[in-house]
Image: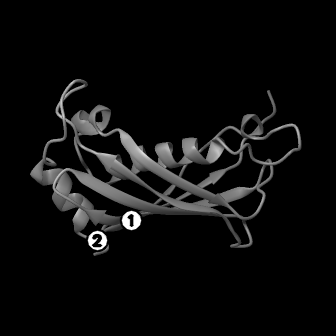
């Protein structure tokens, strides 16, 4: 099953590079988290549940370097939605369309910090599954600090 998806365009900022001048490996995880949050907002969901969806599995592969000032395309897609979990797939591309980073991660909806998983709110599950495709252009400061 394939669910809703989001494409985000953003620029690689100076503070997201390492001493070699290309993207720091951890920046991709930040981009995913930012994109996922933008995804929920773009779907029109109340964000009351966002603090209760920890990542329980993350897999990332790096194929191509990204450099300061480049525009990135981040594609995020819901792969599957379960009773209380969802699996997302993602790819990050450079301006020429080369796949630079790819992978998937799993989130679980939990009751509270000390509780186990609980079913998705109906509105969230429906939004994740309905197949909407959204696009955003995120404004990110790219100036060196």
Label 2: element kind: loop
First in sequence, mark 2 or 1: give its number: 1
Q: Dots 2 and 1: beta carbons under 8 Å?
A: yes
Examine the image and state in which quarter residue 140 appears: top right
Label 1: element kind: strand
Q: Residue at x 68, y 50 (%)?
A: 11
In the image, which disc is placed on residue 133? none
The residue furthest right is 20
Q: Is residue 52 above or below residue 35?
A: above
Image quadrant where one finds the C terminus = top right
Q: Residue at x 58, y 55 (%)?
A: 60
Residue 78 position within the rendered picture, expressed as x and y whole percent measured from the top left? 35, 63
Q: Which residue is mark 1?
A: 5
Q: 122 or 83: nearer the eye?
A: 83
Q: 64 or 75: nearer the eye?
A: 64
Q: Does 113 sit left or right of 17 as displayed?
A: left
Q: Which residue is mark 2?
A: 131
Residue 41 position within the rendered picture, expressed as x and y whole percent measured from the top left? 33, 46
Residue 99 position within the rendered picture, expressed as x and y whole percent measured from the top left? 66, 69
Image quadrant where one finds the N terminus = bottom left
Callout 2 crowding tier (Cα within 10 Å): few <14, some 14–19, many ≥20: some
Number of labels in the image equals 2
Q: Residue at x 72, y 66 (%)?
A: 95
Q: Is residue 78 above or below residue 69?
A: below
Q: Residue at x 10, y 53 (%)?
A: 122
Residue 88 position within the rendered picture, expressed as x and y whole percent measured from the top left? 40, 59
Callout 1 crowding tier (Cα within 10 Å): few <14, some 14–19, many ≥20: many
Q: 56 or 30: nearer the eye?
A: 56
Q: Is residue 5 above or below residue 55?
A: below
């Amino acid at each position: 099953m394939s669910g809703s998806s989001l494409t985000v365009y953003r620029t690689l900022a100076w503070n997201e590079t390492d001493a070699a001048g290309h993207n720091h490996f951890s920046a991709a995880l930040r981009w995913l988290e930012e994109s996922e949050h933008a995804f929920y907002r773009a779907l029109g969901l109340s964000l009351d549940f966002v603090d209760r969806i920890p990542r329980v599995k993350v897999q990332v592969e790096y194929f191509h370097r990204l450099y300061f000032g480049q525009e990135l395309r981040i594609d995020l897609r819901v792969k599957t939605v379960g009773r209380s979990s969802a699996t997302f797939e993602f790819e990050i591309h450079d301006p020429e369309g080369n796949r630079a980073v790819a992978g998937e991660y799993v989130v679980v909806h939990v009751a509270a910090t000390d509780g186990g998983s609980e079913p998705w709110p109906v509105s969230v599950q429906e939004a994740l599954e309905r197949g909407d495709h959204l696009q955003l252009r995120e404004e990110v400061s790219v100036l060196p600090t």
